[in-house]
Amino acid sequence: MLIKRRRGWEIPEREAVAESVFAGRRTILKAMGFAGMAGLMAGAAGGPLGRVLAAETAAAADPTASLYPAPRNPAYTVNRAVTPVEDVTTYNNFYEFGSHKNIWQAAQELPIRPWTVKIDGMVEQEIETEFDDLVRKMPLEERLYRFRCVEAWAMTVPWTGFPLKALVDMARPLGSARYLKMQTFMNPEVAPGQREFWYPWPYTEGLTMAEATNELAFIVTGVFGKPLPPQNGAPLRLIVPWKYGFKNIKSIVKFTFTDERPETFWEAIGPSEYGFWANVNPAVPHPRWSQASERLLGSGERVPTLIYNGYEEYVAGLYAGMQDQKLFM
Ligand SMILES: Nc1nc2c(c(=O)[nH]1)N[C@H]1C(S)=C(S)[C@@H](COP(=O)(O)O)O[C@H]1N2
Ligand SMILES: [Mo]
C-alpha cells in the first residue's frame, strides 16, 4: 500500500513537466491550424480537434453563457503577457482524469450540468443550490492573475468569477468556524483517475477563514470571457494566486466550514513535499527541485519567481507570527 501511494505521487508531478511531450503536442496543434478554442471553425469531427470543437459548442450552449464576458476589474492586472488560450486550456493538471497531459481531452466526459453545490458544516443554515442559480447571484468580474504550479511552470490568465468572500458572506458561518474545506466531485465512471484507489479521493483543499475572505481569493467560473471548460475545473473552481497551483481546487461540489484544519489531497499523498499552506516562495526549494524561477507556458521564457507569486502586499499580513509553520511547501 505504501509503495503504491508513493508511486502515485512520484510519477505525476514529474511527468507533468515532460517538455518533449508538451512541445510535441503544441507542434501538432499548430500544424493543424489550431488557433485556440474561439478560433475553431470546421472539420475534424472525431479526434482531438473534434473534441475541442465539442467543448466550444458546449460553451455556447452553456445556460450561463450570457453572463460572459464580465467586466474586467482593472485593480487586478499583471505586468507580463497573457498566456495563449490553447496553452491554458490544453496544458492541465486534473488527476481525476489521469496523470498525463492529455487530460484536457479526457475531461470533456465530465457532465457539468446539473451541478449541485452544497454549503455545510458550521453555518447558520446549510445551503444546497444549483450552480446556475448560485452564479447568477454573484458579482462576476474578470481579473488578470498570475498562476504558479509547484512544478515550476507558470501562466497569466484572464479568469472570470466572484470573490470567495461573497460566498462566505452568503453562507453566514458561525463564529466558531476557522477553516473552509472544499471538495471536488466523486464520479469514477467518468473520471478514470478516481478508480486508482491509492489516491485519497475526493480531491480536498482548504483555507483559513482569513485566507478565504482575502480579496484575492476568487471562485472562477469562466476563462477568456467564456464559461470555464471542464479541463480547467468547470463549473466552478478556486483560484488563490499567491499559492501553488495544487491549492486551486477544481470542479467543487462542497464547501464545509469547520474548526479543524482539513487534510488536503497532496498533503495526504506526500506530506514531506506538499503542505497545507503552499505559499509561493522562490527561496524555499521543493525537496526535489528549485523554486527560484519558473517557465512561462506559451513563450517558454524562464523568469524569476516572486515571493507570494507577486502578491506580497495583499497577503503577507495573513502569516505574521506564523514562522513556526511550513508556510512555503
Ligand atoms: N480536483 C482537482 N483540482 C486540481 C487538480 C487536480 O488534479 N484535481 N490539480 C491542481 C494542480 S496541481 C494545478 S497546477 C491546477 C491546474 O489548473 P489548470 O489545469 O486550470 O491549469 O489545478 C489544481 N486543481
Ligand atoms: Mo500543480
Image: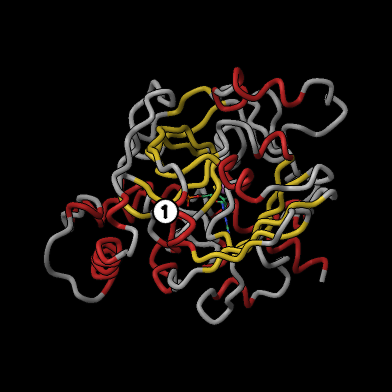
Please identify the quarter of the rendering in which residue 254 is found: bottom right
Residue ID at (17%, 52%): 39
Q: Position of residue 18 (x, y in %)?
A: 48, 50
Q: Position of residue 234 (x, y in %)?
A: 45, 59
Please identify the quarter of the rendering in which residue 239 is found: top right
Q: Amino acid at mark 1?
A: Arg
Instruction: Specify whether 164 is left or right of 27.
Output: right
Neighbor class of circle 1 (other Cα within 10 Å; few <14, some 14-19, many 20+) is few
Q: Is mark 1 within 8 Å of ligand 1?
A: no
Depth order, front residue of 125/310: 125
Q: Position of residue 71 (x, y in %)?
A: 32, 36
Residue ID at (45%, 33%): 145
For the N terminus, the quadrant is bottom right
Rendered position, 236 above or below 159: below
Q: Secondary structure at mark 1?
A: helix
Q: Is residue 232 visible?
A: yes
